[in-house]
Structure formats: structure tokens, C-alpha cells
Image (spheres, helix red, strand yellow):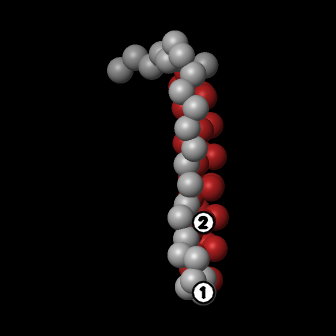
């Protein structure tokens, strides 16, 4: 497989949607932290693959 940079910039946002009127649980924070950590890992792996 060949990876190449996309020729144009496509801005986008990734969001985690939480219920407004429901109390959060300890698992909610752990899940959000895991999502952020995985995103950082995926971003680093992609940057390395495109280098």
C-alpha cells in the first residue's frame, strides 16, 4: 500500500458527545482519556508513515 499526502487541506473536528442532563461516571472520564490517547497514537503513526 502506498501512502501519500492529500493535495488539499480538509479541516474537520472529532468530538465526543456526552449527555447534558445525566451525571457522568468514572468510566466516562477513563473512556475520554483512552480516546485522546488513541488519537495521539494514531496521529503519530500516520505522521511516521507519511515521513
- x 63%, y 46%: residue: 40
Residue 48, horizontal then vertical, whole percent: 60, 28
Nearer the observer, 49 or 10: 10
Where residue 14 appears, x then y in whole percent?
A: 55, 48
User: Measured from the top left, where is residue 29 in percent x and y?
Assistant: 63, 74
Q: Depth-wise, is mark 1 or mark 2 nearer the camera?
A: 1
Query: Which residue extends farthest front?
Result: 21
Whether residue 11 is visible here, answered yes or no, is: yes
Quadrant housing residue 8: top right
Look at the image and tell me in which quarter the N terminus lies. top left
Placement of 13 over or under 30, stated as above or below: above
> At numbered mark 2, what does the secondary structure look like: helix, strand or loop?
helix
Q: Tell which of 34 and 15 is nearer to you.
A: 15
Q: Which residue is the site of mark 2? A: 32
Say the numbered circle drawn on residue 23. Answer: 1
Query: How many other residues sit within 10 Å of disc 1, few (<14), some (14-19) or many (≥20)?
Result: few
- Residue at position x 62%, y 55% from top? 37
Q: Is residue 2 above or below residue 12?
A: above
Rendering quarter of residue 9: top right
- Which of disc 2 and disc 1 is earlier in sequence? 1
What is the x, y in percent for residue 6? 50, 18
Identify the image quadrant of the C terminus.
Answer: top right
Amino acid at each position: 500500500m502506498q501512502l501519500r499526502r492529500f493535495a488539499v487541506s480538509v479541516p474537520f473536528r472529532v468530538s465526543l458527545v456526552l449527555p447534558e442532563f445525566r451525571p457522568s461516571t468514572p468510566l466516562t472520564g477513563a473512556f475520554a482519556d483512552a480516546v485522546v490517547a488513541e488519537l495521539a497514537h494514531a496521529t503519530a503513526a500516520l505522521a511516521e508513515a507519511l515521513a
